[in-house]
Amino acid sequence: MASSKHSFVLPILVIALFTLQAEGQGLKVGFYDKSCPYAEKIVSGVVSQVMAVAPSLSGPLLRMHFHDCFIRGCDGSVLLDSATKQSEKFSPPNLSLRGFNIIDRVKTALESKCPGVVSCADIVALVARDVTFATKGPFWEVETGRRDGKVSLFNDPINPVTGLPPFFSNITFLKQSFALRGLNTKDLVVLSGGHTIGMSHCSSFDSRLYNFTGKGDTDPTMDPNYIARLKLKCKPKDQTTIVELDPGSFKTFDDSYYRLVTKRRGLLQSDAALLDDPETKAYLVQATSHGSTFFKDFGVSMVKMGRIGVLTGSQGEVRKVCTKIN
Ligand code: HEM
Ligand SMILES: *[C@@H]1O[C@H](CO)[C@@H](O)[C@H](O)[C@H]1NC(C)=O
Ligand SMILES: *[C@@H]1O[C@H](CO)[C@@H](O)[C@H](O)[C@H]1NC(C)=O
Ligand SMILES: CC(=O)N[C@H]1CO[C@H](CO)[C@@H](O)[C@@H]1O
């Protein structure tokens, strides 16, 4: 029964998602050059002020663009509030999404110079680039011209096929989740490099430490010394503690994430899964070599991710306030 239902639903999902793929017609670098010439300077100005006082927001602000783009395309849907907590941001995978007030602060600054011009979806994309650069990562030209969506649903991020890939995803599922959005295996391993900055809650990986298959066991693919160290920080069922995704350099965007994953010290199962595919595994080695192309690749894949399912032209709207539709 379940499988006949599945074979009916899947083709429809695939067709629906096809329109979400990374095409990005209507986006261009410098979209606001005439309509709001200082738009990008205003964004980077606010980001540098924030980074000076709250550098730990770099992780959540980079991650926000990923969560926005993977659900309903890069349309600012992740930002919408809901009095009844029925929008995306109230869905479990958002757990550590923070920094919404920074997006609001950027929006306020932009509205005072060019009201009604710069979309919230573009702000999220520009901020993601600026926090990467602020943590010593690469710089890339961000395509702009996205418009804001009017829909944000609690259930979208947790849909088992089209939702955000969960932290326990295996390599097959990760590749499929990216492919549904027009992103390939290289984009997967490159964008996972975003985990070179930021933090994770213990609850996103503690089954690897305490109860991997339900028998009180540990994940055999994880370095036992690393497991021992993590157990000191994360007690069983700890819902509040956060640890560094890339211990030692979690404030710096560098290649150390790939070094750690190669040494079986990827924190999340989805990080460790990159060892299970020949292409992603080869990239882990490449990214830490002398001729690493990681920085250049990251910008290329971020631009691709930024094209997923965008609204352009007269679609959607430009929100006046990022947390509310007009
Ligand atoms: C490949 C699939 C991915 C999975 C399964 C995944 C999963 C996760 C999880 C579980 C966390 C920790 C959340 C918590 O417990 O607080 C996290 C954090 C983070 N993710 Fe991912 N992620 C993925 C891809 C990405 C991508 C594509 C980016 C951006 C390019 C990204 C950027 C980040 C950042 C920067 C953090 C740290 C957030 C913070 O400091 O609060 N992730 N991710
Ligand atoms: C990978 O994960 C998917 C979705 O959870 C599951 O259906 C599949 O059996 C898993 N594949 C392997 C090889 O474990
Ligand atoms: C480990 O997982 C199993 C199956 O999910 C569960 O029955 C058991 O209570 C868990 N043990 C601990 C210590 O959490
Ligand atoms: C920032 C935010 O809205 N966080 C919510 C994420 O989801 C959890 C659980 O669904 C809510 O309790 C949080 O308020």
Image (cartoon, helix red, strand yellow):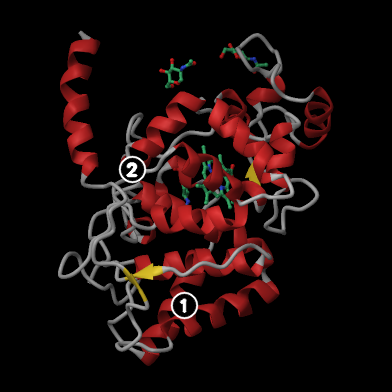
In this picture, residue 68 sits left or right of residue 263: left
Judged by depth in the image, the label closer to the viewer, 2 or 1, is 2
Q: Residue at x 24, y 55 (%)?
A: 151
Contact (Cβ within 8 Å) of mark 2 with mark 1: no
Q: Residue at x 80, y 30 (%)?
A: 226
Kindly state the secondary structure of the residue where label 2 is placed.
loop
Image coordinates for residue 152, horizontal then vertical, percent: 29, 52
* Tag of residue 244: none
The amino acid marked with disc number 2 is Arg
The amino acid marked with disc number 1 is Val
Where in the image, quadrant-wise, is ligand 3 located?
top right
Kindly state the secondary structure of the residue where label 1 is placed.
helix
Q: Residues within 10 Å of mark 1 (few under 14, many from 20)?
A: many
> Does the closest atom of ligand 4 sit within 8 Å of the Cβ of label 1?
no
In this picture, residue 26 sits left or right of residue 80: left
Please state which of residues 2 and 298 is positioned toward the viewer in this rendering. Answer: 298
**Res 242 seen here:** no
Q: Residue at x 58, y 50 (%)?
A: 194
Q: Residue at x 56, y 26 (%)?
A: 278
Please state which of residues 247 and 111 is positioned toward the viewer in this rendering. Answer: 247
Q: Which residue is mark 2?
A: 181
In primary-sequence order, the first of circles 2 and 1 is: 1
> Where does the N terminus fall, quadrant-wise?
top left
Query: Which image quadrant is residue 75 in?
Result: bottom left
Q: Is residue 290 above or below residue 157?
A: below
Query: Which image quadrant is residue 157 in?
Result: top left
Q: Which residue is mark 1?
A: 106
Image coordinates for residue 200, horizontal then vertical, percent: 64, 44
Query: Which image quadrant is residue 219 in?
Result: top right
Please state which of residues 76 and 297 is positioned toward the viewer in this rendering. Answer: 297
